[in-house]
Amino acid sequence: MHLISIDDLSTADIETLFRLSDGFLEVASRPIKKVPTLRGRTLINMFFEASTRTLTSFELAGKRLSADVVNIKASGSSVSKGESLKDTILTLESYRPDILVMRHDKVGACRMATRYTNARVVNAGDGSGEHPTQCLLDLYSLRRTYGSLEGLKVAIVGDVLRSRVARSNVFGFRKMGIDVRLVGPPTLMPPGIEQWDVPVYDDLSALEDVDVVYLLRMQLERAKGTVPPVPSLREYSRIWGLSPQRLRSGQRVMHPGPINRGVELTGDLADSAPSLILHQVESGLAVRMGILYHVLAPHPGEGPLVEEPLA
Amino acid sequence: MHLISIDDLSTADIETLFRLSDGFLEVASRPIKKVPTLRGRTLINMFFEASTRTLTSFELAGKRLSADVVNIKASGSSVSKGESLKDTILTLESYRPDILVMRHDKVGACRMATRYTNARVVNAGDGSGEHPTQCLLDLYSLRRTYGSLEGLKVAIVGDVLRSRVARSNVFGFRKMGIDVRLVGPPTLMPPGIEQWDVPVYDDLSALEDVDVVYLLRMQLERAKGTVPPVPSLREYSRIWGLSPQRLRSGQRVMHPGPINRGVELTGDLADSAPSLILHQVESGLAVRMGILYHVLAPHPGEGPLVEEPLA
Amino acid sequence: MHLISIDDLSTADIETLFRLSDGFLEVASRPIKKVPTLRGRTLINMFFEASTRTLTSFELAGKRLSADVVNIKASGSSVSKGESLKDTILTLESYRPDILVMRHDKVGACRMATRYTNARVVNAGDGSGEHPTQCLLDLYSLRRTYGSLEGLKVAIVGDVLRSRVARSNVFGFRKMGIDVRLVGPPTLMPPGIEQWDVPVYDDLSALEDVDVVYLLRMQLERAKGTVPPVPSLREYSRIWGLSPQRLRSGQRVMHPGPINRGVELTGDLADSAPSLILHQVESGLAVRMGILYHVLAPHPGEGPLVEEPLA
């Protein structure tokens, strides 16, 4: 199976993935942090957009599973010579990779890639589209923290407009029974937000009864040359920035990273006990190991690509 | 032995390489696409010019042979601090690599490198000089397709002027008994082409009786700041671009990639059955595995560098 | 233990490291240049400043010890999105790496990193601060050449001002009983040099009685946009550049690389028998393998991070 959208996974798939991730989390605590599961398999990380955090996470996940890992970055690649995405994927397919992890700046690019390869494609972020592995690591982090996801209340706060994380998380969280809401200034909500069928608030009082405040990264680097959707970062931070004082007792804070200290949240909040931010990163490596295993495992209705159960 | 020019190989060497490649092609079809052949050997890919396609192919070849692979790109390297090629090679030699795969923008750079290292040097393209591994993969692709090379008729079409592939292929194809000709507008033929001792045509009628049309990439990225050798791409495409309609029944099409859809050939031709383009890429990985093995294997008249036959 | 400053090591540590390096030097001479020592361990090379030579050396060291090696370069990383060093290190720590090799353009950055990770941190150069692994490889190269370090006379010559190598080497050489002096024009000596408590000469006659002339690289690439500390390279070379004629019989020459042929030394000197420059590079790989082993080995007073002696 591919993992392009969080919708590609059933709740049963997600539960299976959690159990796999439990095992891989334990591997990371060993002195020898490596298992032979994907020995001789080829993982290609094809990143058309820079993202060291996600790339490093997948690279380590592949190596700890003993796969052969090759990273390709668009800069300096055939892409910069004008090669089309189709031809890039067809070329890679000729090497018969087992898994293609792909980040691209265009919505739908990863889905399109599945048409040109027999490899399992994993979407590591496609433009303003989806970022399903982020959603899965967030869910796993919540499950590790709360035991059960059903009925949890989560507010996703901030720059929904330029966030692919928001989209994947709204749909993925709801699928697992989490009560989700969006919070932020109207200028940071995308057009058509009504169709997401999720409550939207433009007031921090909407955080009062939630278990978790999920802060989005203010996407400063995507704002160049355009009219910024907020008057100033200082203004944004004053109104929307989260501090320990604004957090209610027992509430937890999440963030997909990299964080902007002093913008979405204060530095002391990032470093405080209620913060799950580094817990998310740790969960991410285990979940990505689980995903690499899971997409290669046999699934109903699929062809003979996987010749044998993985050891 | 080194592989700097296609002339470094006898026809017997090339036949040996084909047999090796047959074996490695089979490896690529296994679930565990890896053999221990070069375990503990060090392969350094030293690329002074960007080329993700060739680099990825050699990186995968090395990893599937279980070698330790290190990629070095000139940007960000000591080269950008003004270090000479000689000192770069001498430095790398101090690490005692087994194989140095090198791409450079100057003709003769790879040959020069052999003076400063005990490693086997493989030329992955030196300026407008040679690209022997491309020639070998093309030969292997032809052999897989036609069984025998002797007497095949191949036309190499297009931007001969700026192509190192053309030079290597003319000489390598002829060595294996292929009947080669060059076809294209006179402005795309290099000065001194007479000395190649190969028929040159400036008319597409020269394609009529060939088995294979080998299209060269129009080297758009090398044209910056110079007078372009063709009036316009549209014009070039209209006159010289290959389409299914211009191909005769039974003819095959090859291209070293990356292709410019709509320039050298139409997109539907690239995707059609007569196209061997992806077959070439697949052949390339197997051939490069074969080359990495072959340059390290014992050869007559060589010193004691290889202490033992490879397993 | 971490390796941030050459002062972190006792003379006994350094002797232990030399014995380890002897073993790893022998490994590099085998056909199979690889040992399973760090199998399943994770080495992250975090380079905020470009340095292909040092990075390649650590990458190969890690791979030949069978560690999983991940290279991260600041360009294209979260750092370019404005993430703080603290958050970058905290994120990497979530992957539970065993060793973090770090180069940074700010003095003290590596020391600071130790506060945010349980990994062993190895300083691969921090701004104009220190470069302890260079010092150790230089010491090892001297020990291989002379047998004993005690009483050796070494002159460090040239661009002390912009060299982190000079600082580490003055302190490290002296620790091992070497008689060190600095030589060069006053404009290339840093303010406060008196506090180094080392003899400083501005005349090449200070080289007459030394065993080894250690030339520093003229840091041309750090001079952009500032008033150069020497009137011209030609002038510098004429007065300070070392040639075979200026070297006394039996003297040896060292240089941390990359060398500027025709500036600090003539090309024929670099290539001559008295030059230890490539001997240093070779020593560097063995010493870095030794360092990667040594920082993970159990040390008195340390916590339970290393669960078992390494095999």
Image: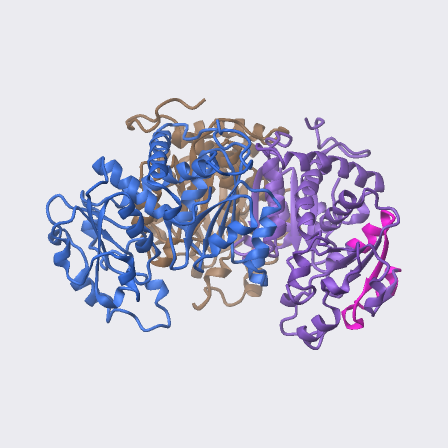
Chain colours: A brown, B blue, C purple
Relative side of B171 to C139, left or right: left
Q: Position of residue B284 (x, y in %)?
A: 35, 42
In the rendered view, would you say B283 is above or below A14? below
Relative side of B43 to B4, left or right: right
Quadrant where the image shows the N terminus of chain C: top right
A184 or A168: nearer the viewer = A168
> Any magenta on residue C173?
yes
In the rendered view, would you say C93 is above or below A204? above
Q: Which residues are magenta?
A: C169-197
In the rendered view, would you say C239 is above or below C24? below
Q: Residue at x 23, y 40 (%)?
A: B149
Q: Is residue A121 visible to us here? A: no
A86 or B15: nearer the viewer = B15
In the rendered view, would you say A146 is above or below B184? above
A202 or B179: nearer the viewer = B179
Q: Position of residue C48 (x, y in %)?
A: 61, 55
Q: Position of residue C29 (x, y in %)?
A: 63, 36
Quadrant where the image shows the C terminus of chain C: top right
- Where, by quadrant of the figure, is residue B198 drawn? bottom left
**Number of marks in picture:** 0
A192 or A26: nearer the viewer = A26
Relative side of B226 to B46, left or right: left
Q: Position of residue A184 (x, y in %)?
A: 48, 55
Q: Residue at x 55, y 40 (%)?
A: A280
Q: Is residue B299 visible to us here? A: yes
> Any magenta on residue B59?
no
